[in-house]
Image (cartoon, rainbow, N blue to C red):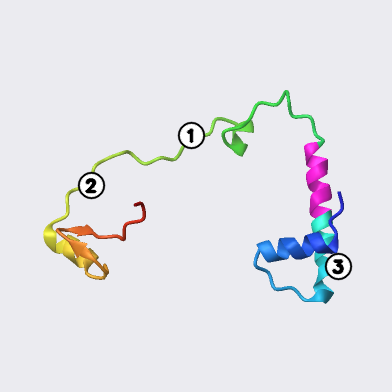
Amino acid sequence: MALTESDVTRIAQLARLHLKEAELPTLGAELNQIMALIEQLQSIDTSNIEPLAHPLSVIGEVGLRLRDDIALPANDEATRDHFMQNAPAREGGVFLVPRVIE
């Protein structure tokens, strides 16, 4: 499926790109190359291939690098107030945010 100049113009509008008329053919050709590559990838039969949790798991066992879930020591009020001094609105040691759901 080849993209037309009107398709390229619409995609540019959706992406908030300001293109000149002279750039449309070049961008259209590049987008068509990308679409051709996607079609080529979609034509590959992957029904018998098991998904990988990590690309390197093909080589060997990959352990997740997660830190231990250890509670940090509680901060005192002075430290909390120091971090909250730039907050536009605060009360009782918490940030106040505008209501977004009515």
x, y percentage for residue 85? 22, 69
Residue carrying label 2? 72
Residue carrying label 3? 25
Residue 83 location, quadrant: bottom left
- Tag 3 or tag 1, which sits nearer the N-term? 3
| Label 3 element class | helix
Q: Is residue 62 above or below residue 102?
A: above
Distance, label 2 to label 1, CA atoms, is: 24 Å
Three-letter amino acid code at the position of disc 3: Pro
Residue carrying label 1? 63
Is disc 1 surrounded by few (<14), some (14 to 19) or many (20+) residues within 10 Å?
few
The range drawn in magenta is: 33-42
| Label 2 element class | loop
Residue 56 location, quadrant: top right
Report the front residue among 53 and 4.
4
Three-letter amino acid code at the position of disc 1: Gly
The reply to whether the magenta stretch includes residue 41 is yes
Three-letter amino acid code at the position of disc 2: Leu
x, y percentage for residue 64? 47, 36
Is disc 3 surrounded by few (<14), some (14 to 19) or many (20+) residues within 10 Å?
few
x, y percentage for residue 27? 80, 65
Is disc 2 surrounded by few (<14), some (14 to 19) or many (20+) residues within 10 Å?
few
> Which residue is painted at 21% across and 63% down in the image?
90
